Each structure stands twice: as structure tokens, then as C-alpha cells.
Image (spheres, rainbow, N blue to C red):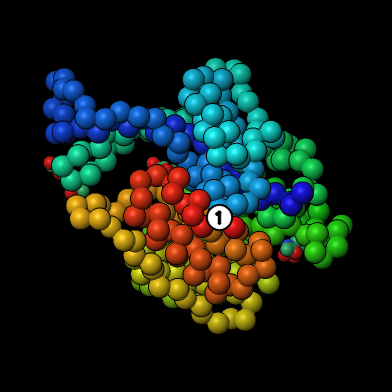
Amino acid sequence: MSKRILVVGLACADIISVVQDYPEEDSDQRVLDYYWQRGGNAANTSCVLSLLGARSEFLGTFATDREAEFLKEVFQKYNVITENCVTYTDGVKTPTSIVITNSKNGSRTILHHGKNWPEIKPEHFKNLDLTQYKWIHFEGRPSCDDIKDMLLWIDEYNKTVDKDARIRTSLEIEKTTRIGLDNLFNTADTLFVSKDYVKSRGYNTKEEGVQKLSVKCREGSEIICPWGEEGAVAMGTDGILHSSPAFSPKLSPGQNMETLAAGDTFNAAFILSRSKGQSLNEALTFGCQVAGSKCGMKGIDGLDTFKS
Ligand SMILES: *[C@@H]1O[C@H](CO)[C@@H](O)[C@H](O)[C@H]1NC(C)=O
Ligand SMILES: *[C@@H]1O[C@H](CO)[C@@H](O)[C@H](O)[C@H]1NC(C)=O
Ligand SMILES: *[C@@H]1O[C@H](CO)[C@@H](O)[C@H](O)[C@H]1NC(C)=O
């Protein structure tokens, strides 16, 4: 059986109401639509990987409430392995976002709950049988020191196996406020940095961002920066700037772009392509193609047309 791609991070529940008009406080109205949706970058990336044909595993923590049951059903539906997830039984609640979507202009008002959520710890991670994996991706959660520990653990494992059995690692740095992530650039083989992150560090373009930030990356690694409708750039071991344009989706008249989860989709497509030994350029282009196509559909289910 082929080796797995593991994604470590958050699964949460988005509880969405679509309204005709944004409500006044202390009023009531009927909503146009109501549904629960899987959320969390790692949850989305692992589901997209599976849709694209990878053997995909999600590693994160679950509570024991209904939202957790819902999330487990979602992973099952997408054929994502969750057998190594950790369940907390001591009354923690699944992180949720209550989302009010205004149907007039698509604006989203979001209320997050997720205080003191227990993340995956190195002691959980060290129980994994690492021989099963070819790639391990980390979402840049606030638990930076723990993420570093887990990445170093994989490095140690790599030293004990043949070159082609080594695990490739990647890390997504998206949020600008997670300062501790600044110290993790030299701990992974592939770094994904977001537009917001690059801008927050004082760089104006994606090209400047990867050039300046690549200095912080370790030897043999590559850094990728997706930039929405401007496509994406990357810099690898050759020190050359690679780029791909964005691929705009075909929209039917009156249809709006849906960019939710486009970043998670890009990462999944890039990782899958690279894990198959395709070049940096090929992976970058595939990432942009699949992410572009996602923007022309509701949710992610239609992405199975890229399955290989
Ligand atoms: C949507 O409309 C509301 C007012 O009805 C406004 O406050 C908000 O900024 C708009 N959002 C977008 C994304 O256009
Ligand atoms: C594996 O770990 C080593 C350190 O032991 C690191 O240099 C390397 O980049 C890692 N990944 C791969 C794919 O070799
Ligand atoms: C995950 O994907 C769903 C759509 O499939 C989206 O509603 C949600 O916002 C995404 N979550 C994140 C964190 O991107």
C-alpha cells in the first residue's frame, strides 16, 4: 500500500446561517439557509488530499460532543484516516465558529469559540509509526514549541532510514500574530507563507517575500507563497524564483467566486504533486490550477475531477 500523507492541526465546526439582512440586536428573523461545515486548515487540507487521490491522514484532537461526532463523520465521508487522533473526555468543547453570512453581499460575521483548546502534543506524536508516512504537513498553530519538537523528531527519524524512506516535512505559516512561528523557518523542508504574513513582515510583493524569507530556511528546503489572483511564487535549492499565474475559474452568469478553503486546497495540491516527485514548477502550477478551480465551485467536492 502507498505511504500516507499526514496533516497535523485543527478540525473545528463552522455553524452557518445565511440571512436576508444583517440582524438588528435583540430582534428575530427567519434565515435563508442553515448548515454545519467542516472548518480548520488542517481538516480542509487533509480532505482535499484525499479527494485528489492521496492516502490522507488527519492528526488532531477531538472533544466528545456532537460537533466532534459531526467532524468524524466528515472525515469518514472523505476517506481521511483519523485513527491516531486524541480524544479529550474532560469536558472540553469542539472549537466552533458561528458564522452569519449576509446574502446581499456575502459579508461574513464570525464568532469564534475555542479557548484553551488542547492541541496535539509531542508525546502523542511520538507514538506514531513513522514508517507509514512519506510527507507530514503542519498547520502553524499557536503551539509553536510543540510543533518544533515534532519536526525535530522527524529529523531524528530521517537520520535512521535510507534516503528514499525519509519523510518530507512542511509547515504553513498563515497567521501574522503567531510570533513563535518566526523561529520555525529552519525546521521544515517546505514552508508555505501567506500573503498576510509576508505583508506583516514588511515585504510588499510575493517575490520580495520569498527572497528575503528564504534566507531563514534551512539548506535543501523550499519556500512557497500563494498570492490569490496573482498566482504563486516559490524558491528552492537552485536559488531561482519560480512562479505560476493564477487560473481563474469559469463562472456561470451571476455566480460568485468562493475563495473559502482555496489556500488549503493550494497546499494540498502542491504537497501531492511534490510527494510524487514532480518538480517545484509543476507542483506550483498544479496548486494554482486546483485552487483556481475550487474558487469556481461551492465547497470542495468537485475537486475529485483532478484525482489521479
Ligand atoms: C455588506 O453590507 C453591509 C451593510 O449592509 C456592510 O456593512 C458591509 O461592509 C458589506 N460588506 C461587504 C463585504 O461588502
Ligand atoms: C529529514 O531529516 C534531515 C535531518 O536529519 C533533514 O536534513 C532533511 O531535510 C529531512 N527530510 C528529508 C526529505 O530528507
Ligand atoms: C474549510 O472549507 C470549507 C468549505 O469547504 C469552508 O467553509 C471553511 O471556511 C474552510 N475553513 C478554513 C479554515 O479555510
Q: Label 1 CB, ligand 3: below 8 Å?
A: no
Q: Position of residue 245 (x, y in %)?
A: 40, 73
Q: Is residue 289 visible?
A: yes
Q: Quadrant of the C terminus?
A: bottom right
| Amino acid found under the numbered disc labelled 1 | Lys
Which residue lies at the image location 80% right of the left edge and 55% below the top edge?
Answer: 156
Which residue lies at the image location 68% right of the left edge and 72% below the top edge?
Answer: 219
Q: Secondary structure at mark 1?
A: loop
**Ligand 1 quarter of the rendering:** top left
Q: Is residue 45 visible?
A: no
Q: Position of residue 202 (x, y in %)?
A: 39, 67
Q: State which quadrant residue 208 falls in.
A: bottom left
Q: Would you name the residue on which mark 1 appears?
A: 307
Which residue lies at the image location 53% right of the left edge and 41% below the top edge?
Answer: 43
Q: Position of residue 12 (x, y in %)?
A: 48, 34
Seen from the viewer's position, the closer of residues 301 and 102 is 301
Q: State which quadrant residue 19 falls in.
A: top left
Q: Position of residue 295 (x, y in %)?
A: 36, 55
Seen from the viewer's position, the closer of residues 128 and 149 is 128
Above or below for 198 versus 207 = above
How crowded pointer 1 is (Cα within 10 Å; few <14, some 14-19, many 20+) is rated as few
